[in-house]
Image (cartoon, helix red, strand yellow):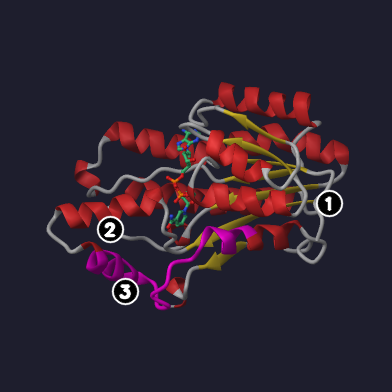
Amino acid sequence: MSLEGKTALVTGSTSGIGLGIALSLAQAGARVILNGFGDASAALAEVGAFGGQVGHHPADVSDPAQIAEMVEYAEREFGGVDILVNNAGIQHVAAVETFPVERWDSILAINLSAVFHGIRLALPGMRERGWGRIINIASVHGQVGSTGKAAYVAAKHGVIGLTKVVGLETALSQVTCNAICPGWVLTPLVQKQIDDRVSAGADPQQARQALLAEKQPSQEFVTPGQLGELVLFLCSEAGSQVRGAAWNIDGGWLAQ
Ligand code: NAD
């Protein structure tokens, strides 16, 4: 499929899943706007290698004003956002009664409120141009809970609810809105949880396998490239009647 002439904005795409999705979109011919913290030069070079226009905006998506600046940048430099992938996300693991309040607030701001702000700011342009794709990277934790993840699970359940509403509100248009629910993907976000087990005395290889064995029946990680391919399907004509869905890609996690 070709996404030539379309512009994709992928939040949190300087590493991990977002970068994998950005690479798939660029390979399919889309212009790509990266976002995320840290030095973006390596990600820019990797995504730019496909030959299309690529940019980076450093918005902190916990701040609605910065999301607005990023969408304005997309309109000014790229002609607007046709494909919005709300991917930026953070994690913190602690029991609910000791969960740091400031962590709760930042997880809700980045993992949930930023999705709302991105959608409300990008959707008018999509409607005006008559086509759009909104893809929210939720999680299996948008559908089931796990101990220690109160804020993350609450935010991801919220993302799936928001996805359903936007899926309905855009149902009569050529704009679709869906959520993707990955199981374990080996990214810095998950590596930190493996490192915590290693700090508590586990062997690194065993810590990794134990993490998979507890939840993911395939005992294999989902890859950012596989998520990128699913995003391309949702952007395709074949995906145009997938609306308001929460699509699992989780090695069987949610089948249990
Ligand atoms: P990651 O830590 O590798 O990448 C997160 C990205 O978000 C980075 O580019 C980071 O710079 C950016 N980011 C963080 N805070 C930001 C902010 N305030 N403003 C802008 N950018 C910010 O994480 P990942 O594992 O690639 O996770 C990406 C998404 O996938 C998240 O929404 C996460 O919840 C979801 N997810 C991950 C897994 C997994 O197993 N890794 C599973 C299910 C869902």
Task: Give the percent coordinates (x, y) of residue 218.
Answer: 43, 78
Is-magenta flag for residue 207? yes
Quarter-of-image position of residue 115: top right
- Find out whether the residues at labels 1 and 3 contact each other: C-beta distance under 8 Å: no
Q: Mark 3 — residue?
A: 213
Q: Mark 1 — residue?
A: 174
Name the quarter where the C terminus is drawn. Answer: bottom left
Quarter-of-image position of residue 213: bottom left
> Taking the image as drawn, is residue 123 in sight?
yes
Please state the extent of the stretch shown in magenta in the rendering.
205-228
Secondary structure mostly seen in magenta is helix
**With respect to residue 182, does 29 lie above or below?**
above
Mark 3 or mark 2: whose residue is earlier in sequence: 2
Find the residue positioned furthest to the left.
Answer: 201
Identity, as a three-letter code, of the amino acid under mark 1: Gln
- Total marks shown come to 3
Of tags 1 and 3, which is closer to the observer? 3
Find residue 147 and name its label.
Answer: 2
Task: Give the percent coordinates (x, y) of residue 236.
Answer: 78, 60
Is-magenta flag for residue 215? yes
Q: CA distance from mark 2 to mark 1?
A: 39 Å
Q: CA distance from mark 1 to mark 3?
A: 41 Å
Quarter-of-image position of residue 197: bottom left
At mark 3, the secondary structure is helix
